[in-house]
Image (cartoon, helix red, strand yellow):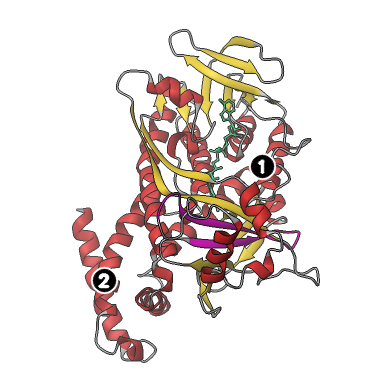
Amino acid sequence: MAITQRVTILGGGPVGALLASYLGRRGYHVTLYERRPDLRSQDVGGGRSINLACSDRGWLALERVGIAETVRRSAIPMRGRMLHAEDGQLTFLPYGFDGQAIYAISRTLLNKHLLDFAARQPQVELHFEQRALSVDFQRHQLRLCDERSGERRTIDVDRLIGADGAFSALRESMRRQDRFDYSQHYVSHGYKELAIPPGPDGDFALDPHALHIWPRGGYMLIALPNADRSFTATLFMPFEGARASFAEVADAAALERLFAQSFADVPALIPNLTEQFFDNPTSSLVTVRCSPWVRDGRYALIGDAAHAVVPFYGQGMIAGFEDCRVLDECLTEAGDDWAQALAAYQSARKPNGDAIADLALDNFIEMRDLVRTPGFQLRRRIERRLHQLLPQRFTPLYSMVTFSHLPYAEARRRGQLQAAMLDALAAEEGIEELLDSEQFMPLAEQAVAKLESMSSARSK
Ligand SMILES: Cc1cc2nc3c(=O)[nH]c(=O)nc-3n(C[C@H](O)[C@H](O)[C@H](O)COP(=O)(O)OP(=O)(O)OC[C@H]3O[C@@H](n4cnc5c(N)ncnc54)[C@H](O)[C@@H]3O)c2cc1C
C-alpha cells in the first residue's frame, strides 16, 4: 500500500518508540519528538539500572513488528514470586503453569532496542531534546521547544499521537477543550529504587528466576534481576505515617531500625544501603484516567498519556504496547481511514485502560498484604488445583491478565466472579486436606459450573 501521509509522535519512551516502528512499517512518514537526549548515546538515567517486567501481551506486540527476539535475548525469566517472611523463611509461589514466566528487562536497554529498531525503518525520523509544549487544534499546529537552545517553534501536523507519558503535553492541550474528562489520583505510597549488587562470588545474590517480595502489610520491598547479575529492589512505603513511612525514615538510625525489623536479610545484600537510600529519589505513583483519547480523526493518546496506572500488576508499559498493536489492527480494518480507525481504537482500548488501572490498584493490596496471609496462599492453591483439573474452564485472574490476550475488562469481570467462588471454597470445612484428593473433583465441577452459569447470566 502506498501511503505518504505524515504522522507526528510525541515521546520516544517504550510506547512512542514501538508505535514509530508500527507506523513506519505501514508506510507512514513518522516524525518523533522526544524531550530527553538520545539514550542510545548518553546516560540519561544517572547510571542506575532500573528494570521492569514484560509478559505475554507485551511479547505479542513486539513480535508483530519483529523485535521480540532481540528484546528476549536481554531478558531474564521469573517463574514466580519468592516471598521473604520476617523470619527469613522463603516461599516460592509459581506465577503460571508449565514454567510460564514473566521477564525482567532493563528499562533503558529495552528503550534503546526500540529506538534503534524504529530508526532503522526507512521513513522514521527521531528528534531528541525537543519538548512539545502545546497543540493548537484549530490550526493543527504543534509548539515545540529545543531543550538545548531554548528556541521555540511551531510546526504543522497532519496526524499527531501523544505517547508522552503520564504528564502528556497533548493530553494537557486536550484537557483545555470542552467536554474532556480527566482525573488523576496519587496513592499514599511512594517508591525508592535500591541496587543489590552481585554477591562476593560475582553471582546473583538471590535466585534470579523469581520476583522477590518482602510483603509487610502497609509497605513492601520487591526485587527483579538484571542481566549484569545485580538486582534492582524497589521499596514501596507511605509518604507519611507513624509506622513505616518515608517521612519517618529521616536518618541513618531510623533506616537501620526499619531494615533490622522488617527486612533483616537485606542489609547484607546492599553494602551502601544508607547512601543509596538518601541519595536516590523518592517518587510518587499516579493513576490517570481521561476521555476521549482521540479527537478530530487525527489526534490520539496512547500508553501512559492515555492511562497511567500504578505498577503493581507489571502491566503499565505492556498495556501501552497492546494499544500499539490494536491501533495497527484498527488501521488495517479501516483501510487506513484515520477517523474510523481512531474511533475503533478508542472503543476497543478505553474500557481496558480503566480495567487495568483498577486491577493494578487491587494488586497493590494483594502484594503488600495478602500474599503473606494463609488465606491468600490457600486461595492460590485452590486456583491452581481448579486450573489443573479443569484447564479449559478455569483460569486464575493473574494468568488471564499476564499470560493471555483476553481484554483486561473481561479478565476483571471474570476475576470478580471467581473471587467470590474462591472465598466460598476456601471456607469449606477441611478444604486443605481435600484439595489434593480425588474427592475435590466433584466440588471443583460444582463450583466451576456455578461460575459459568453466573458468568453467562451477567453477560446477557
Ligand atoms: C516503579 C515502576 C515500575 C514499573 N514496572 C512496570 C513493569 O514491570 N511492567 C510494565 O509493563 N510497566 C511497568 N511500569 C509502568 C511503565 O513504566 C509505564 O507504563 C511505561 O513507561 C509507559 O511508557 P510510555 O512510553 O507510555 O511513557 P513513558 O515511559 O513515560 O515515556 C514517555 C516519553 O515521553 C517523553 N516526554 C514527556 N513529555 C514530553 C514532551 N512534552 N515532549 C516530548 N517528549 C516528552 C519522556 O521523556 C519519555 O521518554 C512501572 C512503572 C513504575 C513507576
Furthest residue in direction top, as rendered = 139
Q: Quadrant of residue 446?
A: bottom left
Quarter holding the N terminus?
top right
Furthest residue in direction right, as rendered = 201
Q: Does the magenta stretch include residue 239?
A: yes
| Residue 55 visible within the image | no
Can you identify the residue that label 2 sits on? 421
Main SS category, magenta section: strand
Separation of marks 1 and 2 at Cα, in angstroms: 41 Å
Can you identify the residue that label 1 sits on? 111
Name the side, left or right, on which 335 lies relative to 450. Answer: right
Q: Earlier in the sequence, mark 1 or mark 2?
A: 1
Amino acid at the residue labelled 1: Asn
- Looking at the image, which residue is at 41% across and 53% down? 360
Which percent across, then down, holds residue 110? 67, 46
Q: Does the magenta stretch include residue 246?
A: no
Magenta span of residues: 220-241
Amino acid at the residue labelled 2: Met
Which percent across, then down, holds residue 92? 53, 76
Q: Does the residue labelled 1 lie within 8 Å of ligand 1?
A: yes
Name the side, left or right, on which 169 lies relative to 351. Answer: right
> Is 258 located above or below residue 25 in the figure?
below
Which percent across, then down, holds residue 147? 67, 20
For numbered disc 2, what is the local secondary structure? helix
